[in-house]
Image: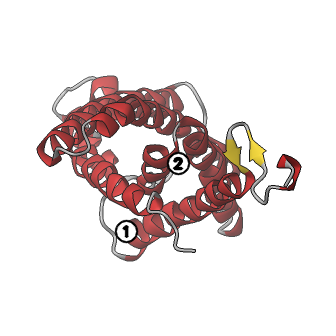
Amino acid sequence: MKQTHYNAIMVKGKPQSSIQKIFILCIASALGNEALSILVSGVFGAPLYLDTVFTVAITFSFGLLPGMLTGVLLYPLCENLKMLLLDSGEGIFWAGNAFVLCTVTEILLVCFFRSRLKMRQEFFISTAANLMVLVVLDCILISIMGGVIDFILHNFVSVRQNLYPEDIFKLGLIRTNVPVLPAAILSRIPINIVDRFIAIFGGYGISLLYQKPSKT
């Protein structure tokens, strides 16, 4: 049989069926992020976001490009559509997209740790230790980047924003004479400690399900 008659057409070293599967999982993950975020913060009113759990899972499973597709394109698209449907206002519509830089940072961090986890995946303790280091770094970098973005939006850009969980901590810090920028950064740490722990460990667990071979 000629090679052109293979059922699985190779695209950049991967069968076309595999590319399609990854794309479908990216779409499902973006919707999963949106659903989980609405459930946690909207329905249960918890001061968490959990809007990157499935992005982390996709990145752990398939690497940088699927992670970027999910977290930088598809999930923001879902979020923007939700804002339009809810008539949230143009200011929130584009201002919220600025925080996608935090998602990019997280994806890059996960990619950096991904190869280390693959090399040591047979050792549970080593895997858990690497994930904890990732949680700490993720929390610190996301808090810094999110605080800087928040500072810029509030002080240099005229934009209307909703009240977010970290704003309660930020106002408390400002009242104790902490400068606005450090307050914007520090106020995110208590939330991000829990949020990023669930996102990283939960995302890693989901990634193991994504990578399970499908039964034929």
The image quarter in which residue 5 lies:
bottom right
Asked whether 78 or 128 is in front, the reply is: 128
Residue in view at x 54 percent, y 60 percent? 29
Q: Position of residue 149 (x, y in %)?
A: 48, 30
**Dot label at residue 161:** 2
Classify mark 2: residues with Cα within 10 Å, few (<14), some (14-19) or many (20+): some
Please determine whether, in this image, residue 5 is positioned above or below residue 66: below
Please determine whether, in this image, residue 167 is positioned above or below residue 182: below
Q: Position of residue 159 (x, y in %)?
A: 60, 40
Residue in view at x 30 percent, y 34 percent? 119
Asked whether 5 or 188 is in front, the reply is: 5
The image quarter in which residue 135 lies:
top left
Q: Amino acid at mark 2?
A: Gln
Residue 205 seen in the figure: yes
Residue 50 seen in the figure: no
Please determine whether, in this image, residue 148 is positioned above or below residue 114: above
Q: Amino acid at mark 1?
A: Val
**Dot label at residue 143:** none
**Dot label at residue 40:** 1
Asked whether 63 or 159 is in front, the reply is: 63
Residue in view at x 28 percent, y 52 percent? 201
Could you tell me which quadrant the N terminus lies in?
A: bottom right
Instruction: Give the mark nearest the N terminus, 1 or 2.
Output: 1
Question: Mark 1 against mark 2, which lies toward the viewer?
Answer: 1
Determine the secondary structure under disc 1. Answer: helix
Q: Is residue 92 left or right of residue 3?
A: left
Could you tell me which quadrant the C terminus lies in?
A: bottom right
Q: Is residue 212 left or right of residue 4?
A: left
Q: Position of residue 27 (x, y in %)?
A: 63, 60
